[in-house]
Image: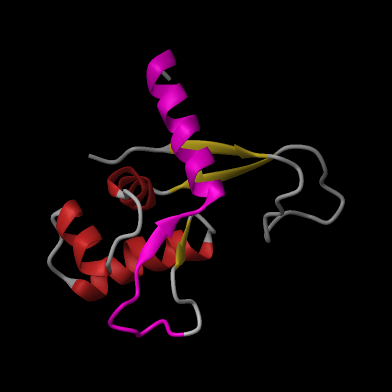
Amino acid sequence: MRVRVTVFLSEHFQVQQAAPEVTGEVTGEVTGEVGRLLAVMSGEMKRKEIQSALGLKHEDYFREAYLVPAIKAGFIEMTIPDKPRSSRQQYRVTALGKDVLRKTDQDKESGQ
């Protein structure tokens, strides 16, 4: 099942593809994979915990389709950003990621 979510970001967020003269509200799209990742996150979690919660076994696919896009979009962050390969590395949802989750929940409640 693939779910499409449209996220409306406040104007202080910039989308790289947007033309410089564009102002006002900017929309960003959350892929189904990133949306699923955000939905299973709770507090700080290790990669293996997130992957297990999603029911995924292939580490490379998880990184490419879920983890890296979520980090690049600013929806999740590393707890030890200076050491991305640390065995103690964990991930947490950012304020922007929480906004996306709230918007998704509101859309579900309103039937969109």
Q: Quadrant of residue 74?
A: bottom right
Question: Can residue 111 be seen in this snapshot?
Answer: no
Q: How is the protein colored in the picture?
A: secondary structure
- Taking the spot 41% from the left edge, 81% from the top edge, the residue there is 84
Q: Quadrant of residue 83?
A: bottom left
Residue 23, placed above or below residue 62: above
Q: Residue furthest right?
A: 21
- Taking the spot 37% from the left edge, 45% from the top edge, the residue there is 35
Q: Position of residue 68 (x, y in %)?
A: 41, 68
What is the tally of numbered marks visible in this picture?
A: 0
Question: Can residue 95 be seen in this snapshot?
Answer: yes
Residue 17, placed above or below residue 90: above
- Taking the spot 83% from the left edge, 56% from the top edge, the residue there is 20
Q: Quadrant of residue 18?
A: bottom right
Bounds of the magenta segment: 83-111
Residue 73, placed above or below residue 1: below
Q: Position of residue 57 (x, y in %)?
A: 12, 66
Question: Between residues 49 and 12, which one lies in front from this camera angle?
Answer: 49
Q: Position of residue 46 (x, y in %)?
A: 27, 67
Quadrant for the C terminus, please: top left
Quadrant for the N terminus, please: top left
Q: Position of residue 15 (x, y in %)?
A: 67, 55
Q: Is residue 77 left or right of residue 49?
A: right
- Taking the spot 73% from the left edge, 37% from the top edge, the residue there is 25
Residue 34, placed above or below residue 66: above
Residue 82 within the magenta-colored segment of the rendering: no
Question: Between residues 96 and 69, which one lies in front from this camera angle?
Answer: 96
Q: Is residue 95 left or right of residue 83?
A: right
Residue 88 within the magenta-colored segment of the rendering: yes
